[in-house]
Image (cartoon, rainbow, N blue to C red):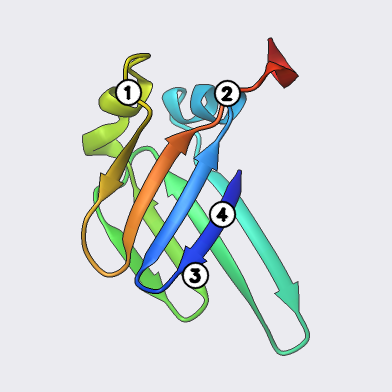
């Protein structure tokens, strides 16, 4: 999973194996720790909301997982604060 932050927005790019895990009902996580703090992001295939607490952001994808899994779709966007975009980034690494 690749994550990019811009003001008011989080952009997440997932590969084919991560999408397969989401479709199996498995959350995927990205985490960075440093002395005195850290940051974490979870994509939750069973969740329904975007919720943040301190350095943790949980993104519920249940309502949009079908759309995200559609081969004709590049990704989905969840509006709110922050706005979260989850895009598929399928390269040859797992083909």
C-beta proximity under 8 Å, tags 3 and 2:
no
Give the distance between the C-alpha atoms of the residues marked 4 and 3, in whole angstroms. 13 Å
Q: Which mark is residue 90?
A: 2
**Mark sitting earlier along the chain (2/4):** 4
Circle 4 sits on which residue?
3
**Mark sitting earlier along the chain (4/1):** 4
Q: Secondary structure at mark 4?
A: strand
Q: Quadrant of residue 38?
A: bottom right
Give the distance between the C-alpha atoms of the residues marked 4 and 1, in whole angstroms. 19 Å
Instruction: Please state the horizontal and vertical placement of residue 49, each as a whole percent of the image.
Output: 25, 55
The residue at the far right in this view is: 35
**Mark sitting earlier along the chain (4/3):** 4
The residue shown at (49%, 48%) is: 12
Give the distance between the C-alpha atoms of the residues marked 2 and 4, in whole angstroms. 15 Å
Give 45 or 32, whichever is nearer the viewer.
32
The residue shown at (57%, 64%) is: 40
Circle 1 sits on which residue?
73
**Mark sitting earlier along the chain (3/2):** 3
> Position of 24 compared to 16: left or right?
left
Circle 3 sits on which residue?
56
The residue shown at (32%, 15%) is: 72
Number of residues whose C-alpha sits closer than 10 Å to that of mark 3, classed few (under 14), some (14–19) or many (20 or more)? few
Name the front one of labels 3 and 2. Answer: 2
Instruction: Please state the horizontal and vertical placement of residue 57, each as a whole percent of the image.
Output: 44, 65
C-beta proximity under 8 Å, tags 4 and 1:
no
Instruction: Please state the horizontal and vertical placement of residue 20, each as a whole percent of the image.
Output: 52, 21
Name the front one of labels 4 and 3. Answer: 4
Q: Secondary structure at mark 1?
A: loop
Instruction: Please state the horizontal and vertical placement of residue 26, each as a whole percent of the image.
Output: 50, 34
Name the front one of labels 3 and 1. Answer: 1
Q: Secondary structure at mark 2?
A: loop
Assign the C terminus to one quadrant of the image: top right
């Amino acid at each position: 999973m690749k994550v990019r932050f811009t003001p008011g927005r989080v952009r997440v790019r997932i590969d084919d194996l991560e999408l397969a895990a989401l479709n199996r009902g498995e959350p995927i996580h990205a985490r960075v720790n440093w002395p005195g703090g850290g940051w974490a992001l979870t994509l939750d295939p069973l969740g329904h909301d975007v919720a943040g607490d301190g350095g943790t952001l949980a993104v519920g994808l249940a309502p949009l997982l079908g759309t995200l899994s559609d081969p004709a779709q590049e990704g989905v966007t969840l509006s709110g604060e922050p706005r979260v975009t989850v895009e598929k980034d399928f390269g040859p690494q797992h083909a």
